[in-house]
Amino acid sequence: MYNQEKKLFMMVMRVLLFFILVPVLALGQKKNRSSLMEQWKSTADSGIQTRYNQYKDIAFAIWDYAELGYKEEKSSSLLQQTLKENGFEIESGIAGIPTAFVASYGSGGPVLGILAEFDALPGLSQYALPEKKPIEGRISGHGCGHHLFGTASVAAAIQVKELMLQHNWKGTIKVFGTPAEEGGSGKVYMVRAGVFNGVDAVLHWHPSDENTTWADGALANKSAKFRFYGTAAHAAAAPEKGRSSLDAVEAMNHMVNMMREHIPADAKIHYVITQGGKAPNVVPDFAEVYYYVRHPNRELVMQLFERIRKAAEGAAIGTETRSDFEIIGGTYDLLLNKHLAEIMQANLLRIGGVNYSREEEEFAQKIQSSFGYATDPLESARSVKPIKINSGKTTGSTDVGDVSYTVPTVGLRAATWIPGTPAHSWQAVACGGTEIGIKGMMVASKTIALTLIDLLHDPTALQKARIEFDSARGTGFTYTPLLGDRSPALNYRD
C-alpha cells in the first residue's frame, strides 16, 4: 500500500513540475530572446551611426549628380559599388533597364527586400541655400530626396548583413535598385519581369517633412505623351495651307478641361505641353502634350484615360491633323499591410525623430519664411506621428504600388525636409543637400534595419503579413500592368 501511495505521489509531483517548469522555462527563453533582440537592434543603430560620414558622402554625391530617370548611371554605379565592396552579389541591367540592379546577400529564407531609388527631377536645380538660387548649368535637382532614399536603403542592408555574418543568421537580403520612379514606372517593369518573385516582404521609405509609417496609400496613375502631326506653312503668307499641330494640342486640352466637371472629385488630371512649335510665324507641324491621370481606383484611371484618348482623337479630326500617343507610365494604388506597419512603427518610435542644431534651426526658419503659409513648428520633426491607416490624405502616386500587389510591402516617411516643405520644390532640394536631410536619412535607415531584424527572427510575423496580403488582394487576382507590354521608356525625359 505504501509503495502505491509513493508512486502516486511521485506521479502527481511530476505533473505539477511539468506545468510549473515548462512555463517558467518558456518565459526564460522569451526573456533571453528579447534581450538578444535588444542587443542586436542596439548594435544596428550604433553601427549605422558609426558610418554617418560615409553615407553622407554617398548621398551628397548623388545629390550633386542629380541624374534624371533611366539616366542615373553614376548614381546607380555608386550604390552598386558600395554594396559590392560590402559582400553583396550584384546583378545589373535588370528588366531591360541599364541602371536597375539587384544586390543579394545570404541564402535561404526568409527573403527580405529593400527598395532603393535614386532619380532626380527636371527643372529643380538649386543650391543648398535657404533662398531660391538655381545652380547655373544644371537642369535637375533632387526635389523628392531620392539621393537619400537609395543611400539609406543601402546602409540598412549593409548593417543587417554584418549581423547576419557575425551571428550566422539564415535568410537573404536583397536591395532592389529601382530607377525612374518619377514618372518612368521603373518598378513596374521589374515587377512584370518577375524580379520580386519569391520575396517574403519588401521594405521602403520616402523623404518627407514628418516621421511616420506610411499608411495613406497612393493613387493609381497612367501617363502618356500625345503627339500631333500637321502641315507647316508660313503663318502670314499662306496660313490656309497649314494645319497646326499646336491647335490640336490646345483643342485637346480645352476638351479635357471641360471634362473635369464630369469626373469624380477625387480624380486628378495634369498635363504639360512639351513641344509646341519653334517660331510664331511657322504653323507648327508637330506638337506634343504629356498627360497624367490619377485616382485611388485603377479601373477608373483606365476609364478616364480612355476619355482623354478620345479627346485627342477628336482634336485631330477637328484640326485635320494626325495623332498618336505613347504610354509612358502606369502604376497601381498602394496595397497597405497593417501588420507590417505596426512592426515598423514600433521601430520608428524607438529610433525617434530629427534634432536640429542651432545653425540648422536658423536655416529652417529661413526656409519656412519662404512658404507664405502657416506650417507645423520645427519641433514636430523630433516627434513620430501615429499610424493612421487610410486617413484619406492620399495624394501622390508611386510605382511601389505595383510591388505592393506582388509581395507584402511596408514603408515609412522620415523628416528629411523642414516641416511644411512640399515635395518637388526648391526648398526640398535645398534641405536634401544639408545635414538636415542626412539626419532624416539616418532615421529611415535605422528603422528599416531594425524592422529587418524583427522579420528575420519572427516567421509568424511574415505569415500574418501574407494572410493579410492575400485577403486584401482578393482571390483570383492577376497582375496586369497599366502600361501594358511596352518596353521601358528609357528616353521619356528627352
Image (cartoon, rainbow, N blue to C red):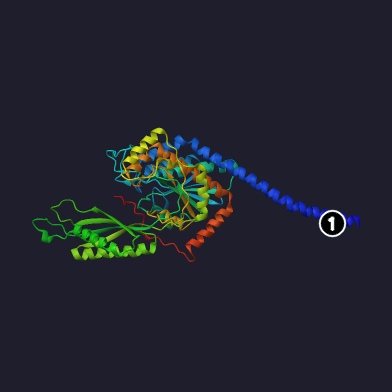
In the displayed structure, 83 sits above or below 359; it is below
Q: Position of residue 141 (x, y in %)?
A: 33, 43
Q: For the image shown, how many numbered marks are present on the structure?
A: 1
Give 143 or 249, whichever is nearer the viewer: 143
Residue at the (40%, 42%) spot, across then down: 377
Nearer to me, 100 or 379: 379
The quarter of the image holding the N terminus is bottom right
Q: Residues within 10 Å of mark 1 (few under 14, many from 20)?
A: few
Where is residue 93 drawn, in percent x and y? 41, 49
Point out residue 78 in the picture as x, y percentages from the top left corner. Answer: 41, 41
Is 285 displayed left or right of 337 in the figure? left
Amino acid on which disc 1 is placed: Leu
Residue 321 is left or right of residue 262, and the answer is: left
Which residue ends up furthest to the left in the rendered image?
237
Place of residue 325 in the rendered image (x, y in percent of width and height, measured from the top left): 28, 60
Q: Is residue 291 left or right of residue 101?
A: left
Mark 1: secondary structure: helix
Q: Nearer the viewer, residue 16 or 305?
A: 16
Q: Is residue 355 visible?
A: yes
Disc 1 target residue: 8
Residue at the right extreme? 1
Q: Is residue 462 above or below residue 163?
A: below
Residue 87 visible? The answer is no
